[in-house]
Image: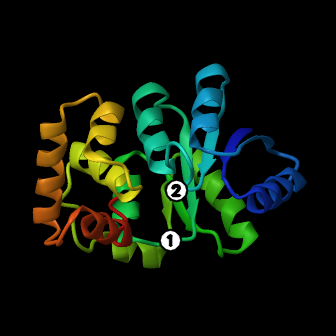
Amino acid sequence: MRILLAEDQAMVRGALSALLSLSGEFDITQAADGDEALALLKTSEFDLLLTDIEMPGLSGLELASWCQQNKPKLKIVVITTFGRAGFIKRAIESGVGGFLLKDAPSDTLITAINHVMAGKRIIDPELAIMAVGESDPLNDKERKALKLAGEGRSTSEIAATLFIAEGTVRNYLSEAISKLHATNRIDAARIAQQKGWL
């Protein structure tokens, strides 16, 4: 089974790769961030994407959305340190088959991979309960603008990155601030980050 492992922390990536290689049934390709993973997905074939959520470049959820559109047969398992309700909901909506916390026992990961490959969905029960919590009020455009604002980008930088007018950026950020009952764009980004909506 060909697995693409996308994880930005080198030690965690190495440990996961070594663990999976021990089973003898997995051929592991490593990617150090979301952008490297996307480049590999575009040029090579894999059976499963095992990805972290928060990474430089594309996030694991953005990778999952891309796969849903472009490689619908590819199975996806997300491993994360964060069990935020917003992450879980977005993962499910992006066609993710498994959602596990990084502190799960190693045999749980291998079992989850095998179940997901068999067409089942595996989500830690506690995480599944969290997923029925608050719904994400942000739309995709507001989320992208807010994520960039949270990184300290100016309105003009956000406009250039997203190829939209500065006025449109201000509208997106204003909507996001209003929806999240925040005091400003940085506060809105912080709230959305804590909820797992960014």
Given the image, on which type of amino acid does mark 2 rest?
Ile
Labelled disc at residue 82: 1
Q: Which residue is mark 2?
A: 53
**Whole-percent x and y of residue 84?**
41, 71
Identify which residue, 50 or 180, lies in the foreground.
Answer: 180
* Whole-number angstrom distance, CA of label 1 to CA of label 2: 9 Å
Q: Quadrant of residue 162?
A: top left
- Residue at x 62% of width, y 59% of height: 112
Identify which residue, 14 or 133, lies in the foreground.
Answer: 14
Labelled disc at residue 26: none
**Whole-percent x and y of residue 172?**
16, 47
- Residue at x 29% of width, y 71% of height: 191
Identify which residue, 192 or 111, lies in the foreground.
Answer: 192
147 relative position to 70: left or right: left
Given the image, on which type of amino acid does mark 1 rest?
Phe
Residues at circles 1 and 2 in contact by the CB criterion of under 8 Å: yes
Secondary structure type for disc 1:
loop
Q: Quadrant of residue 1?
A: top right
